[in-house]
Image (tube, grey):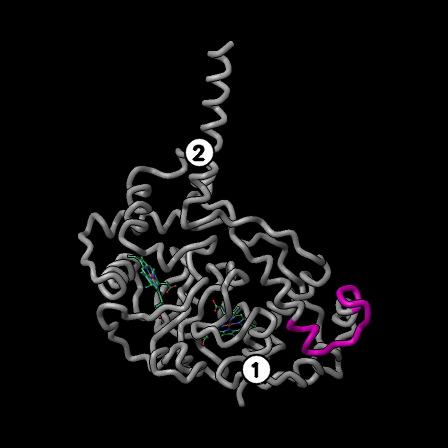
Amino acid sequence: MIRKLVVSLLSIGVVVTSMNALANEPIQPIKAVTPKSADVVELGKMLFFDPRLSKSGFISCNSCHNLSMGGTDNIPTSIGHAWQQGPINAPTVLNAGMNLAQFWDGRAEDLKAQAGGPIANPGEMASNHELAVEILGSIPQYRVHFEKAFGSDVVNINRVTTAIAAFEETLVTPGSRFDKWLEGDKRALDSSEVEGYKLFKSAGCAGCHNGPAVGGALYQKFGVHRTYKTDSTAEGRKGVTGKDSDLHVFKVPTLRNIELTYPYFHDGAVWTLEEAVDIMGKVQLDRDFNKKEIDSIVAFLKTLTGDQPDFKMPILPPSTNGTPRPQPFN
Ligand code: HEC
Ligand code: HEC
């Protein structure tokens, strides 16, 4: 009888410890999302893929945030309208809904506030909100989707950005090997990957890269201990707050799917994870990792790749005779 009681107390103990263990980890598993409205998300997906939101009729959100490539363009800085060289690396849209704010410097408060920006940015899609709304409104099949999503067929920029943001909120990546490990499947990681995670915590990486997105929750200076040499003129938070102390302070990026989102840093100058980890050690922690340490952290980082968005390609309704024409070359 007493033995039975001890055994059951012990097993309760085990459950409690494993729950506590998860609570004590700096990183939490990503949860799948249930979209609030399937019709709004479907419309947002169409808009995300529709190049008619750009002046050229050629550039969509997906051009720079390619969902077949981790939600990025895999080039140092993006190519905008008329092949303009962009000023900064395109961050991933995957799990972006978890960020405390959007953009490297956090100048947009959320996904909806962000989504109107690129459409009207002359260096990106180079259109404007009136034109984008006129184009969509000239397409009856689009108006049917607006009706389904919002209860009337009125097209306006508020609805456009609401729908795009709703779609982006579904772009989460649960199911990574690391999350399986966190949830108790100890075979999901090998010993080098576990070593890498321990070092990631003990060295101090997790002080900045933490939470479910392994980042996105804080602003931090890039260059805490040593200076990062770059040709980029990006000022970071200083551009938003005007404070000198915010020079080179950036949103700590998510490390989810980091294996897919090269090249790294806001200037996109670093192509390998090994080099990125080496730089982070030196610049942020004043620590020179040896090769074995770098390899184990990189092995851990690669376990953060989750299930990529999986959906049916949206088929976009054709333009009509009255739809304003694209202007690809001016
Ligand atoms: C020409 C390439 C380009 C296009 C087109 C583009 N983006 Fe971006 N996007 C970028 C770049 C570059 C940044 C980073 C800008 C910055 O931080 O100053 C960015 C930032 C973002 C972010 C912030 C992510 C983060 O972690 O801070 C989101 C979300 C986003 N874009 C969504 C969109 C949506 C939605 C569209 C379509 C309406 C779009 N983008 C079109 C290049 C592009
Ligand atoms: C003091 C906060 C801080 C610490 C500590 C820190 N990081 Fe970072 N990390 C950042 C910031 C800020 C950036 C963005 C830098 C920039 O402007 O490009 C970043 C960027 C990165 C990137 C590139 C992400 C991308 O999408 O371009 C990687 C990889 C990375 N960190 C890994 C690590 C690792 C591994 C460690 C530990 C060795 C670490 N970081 C320690 C704040 C930190």
Query: Which x, y percent locates residue 187?
Result: 39, 33
Asked if one can make out residue 244 in the rendered structure from this viewpoint, the answer is yes
Bin the neighbour count of mark 2 within 10 Å (Cα to Cα): few under 14, some 14-19, many 20 and up: few
Mark 1 residue type: Ser
Residue at horizontal 30 percent and vertical 45 percent from the top: 198
Question: Is residue 7 depicted above or below 282 in this figure?
Answer: above
Asked whether 176 or 83 is in front, the reply is: 176
**Label 2 to label 1: alpha-carbon separation:** 57 Å
Residue at horizontal 50 percent and vertical 45 percent from the top: 175
Query: Which x, y percent locates residue 280?
Result: 28, 62
Instruction: Choose the circle earlier in sequence order: 2 or 1.
Output: 2
Query: Which region is colored magenta?
Result: 147-161
Asked whether 272 or 50 is in front, the reply is: 272
Residue at horizontal 40 percent and vertical 34 percent from the top: 186
Mark 2 residue type: Thr
The residue singled out by tag 1 in the image is 56
Question: Is residue 277 depicted above or below 268 in this figure?
Answer: above
Asked if one can make out residue 257 in the rendered structure from this viewpoint, the answer is no
SS category of the residue bearing label 1? loop
The residue singled out by tag 2 in the image is 17
Quarter of the image with the C terminus is bottom right
Find out if the beta carbon at label 2 lies less than 8 Å from the nearest ligand 2 atom: no
Q: Is residue 167 left or right of residue 15?
A: right
SS category of the residue bearing label 2? helix
Bin the neighbour count of mark 1 within 10 Å (Cα to Cα): few under 14, some 14-19, many 20 and up: many
Find out if the beta carbon at label 1 lies less than 8 Å from the nearest ligand 1 atom: no
Residue 151 within the magenta-colored segment of the rendering: yes
Query: Which x, y percent locates residue 305?
Result: 43, 50
Question: Is residue 247 depicted above or below 190 in this figure?
Answer: below
Residue 175 within the magenta-colored segment of the rendering: no
Name the mark on residue 328: none
